[in-house]
Image (cartoon, rainbow, N blue to C red):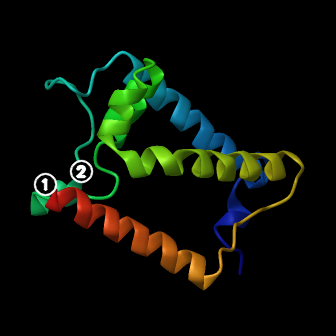
Amino acid sequence: MSSAADRLPPVLRHPAAAPLGVLAAGFAGALYLYGTDPHESGHWLPRCPFRLVTGLLCPACGGTRMVYDLMHGRFGMAWHDNRALLLAAPFALALLARWAYEGFRGRRWRPTPRPRTQAAILLAAVAWAILRNVT
C-alpha cells in the first residue's frame, strides 16, 4: 500500500520542496503586508482566533504589526507590538534557514528539541501571554 507522499510528483518529494514552499508563501505574504498597514482598519488581514473567542491577547498577537513595522524600519514600534516575538524571530529564521539549507543538500531535517526546551518555550509563551494581558 502506497502512502500519500509516494503519489506526489518527484519534485514535490524533494527535501527542499517544503522549505521552498514556506519561503515562497512568506515572501508573498510580506509583499502584501508591505503595502497594507495593519495599524489601520479596512484591510484583509487574518485576525487572531484566540482573541476573537476570548478577547485576550495570545503570545503572537501583534506579530503582523511587528513585521510591518520592521519592514518599514520602525524598530521601536515593532518592540511595542510584540517584544517576545521580536526576540524569538531570529531563532525562528535560523531554524527556517537550516531547514532550507539541509533541503537543498538533499537531506530531510527536523529539529528535535529536548523536553526541557519544549517546556521552557511553552512556559515562556504562557508567561508572556499572562504578562501582556495583566499589564
Which amino acid is tagged 1?
Answer: Leu
Residue 1 place in picture, x, y as percent: 71, 81
Front in this rendered view, residue 84 or 1: 84
Mark 2 lies on a secondary structure that is loop
Residue topped by disc 1: 52
- Measured in 3D between alpha carbons, the distance from the residue under mark 1 to the one under mark 2, in whole angstroms, is 6 Å
Comparing 29 with 68, the one in front is: 68
Residue position for label 2: 48
Residues tagged 1 and 2 counted as in contact (Cβ below 8 A): yes
Give the residue displayed 58% in from the left and 83% down from the top.
116
Residue type of the residue flagged with mark 2: Cys
Which of the two residues, 68 or 88, is positioned nearer the viewer here?
88
Q: Is residue 37 visible?
A: yes
Q: Residues within 10 Å of mark 2 (few under 14, many from 20)?
A: some
The residue shown at (71%, 66%) is 110
As displayed, is residue 91 above or below residue 114? Answer: above
Q: Quadrant of residue 97?
A: top right
| Residue 18 visible here | no
What is the quadrant of residue 55 in the picture? bottom left
Residue 72 percent coordinates (x, y): 43, 17
**Image coordinates for residue 66, horizontal then vertical, percent:** 37, 35
Q: Is residue 15 left or right of residue 45?
A: right
Location of the C terminus by quadrant is bottom left
Q: Secondary structure at mark 1?
A: helix
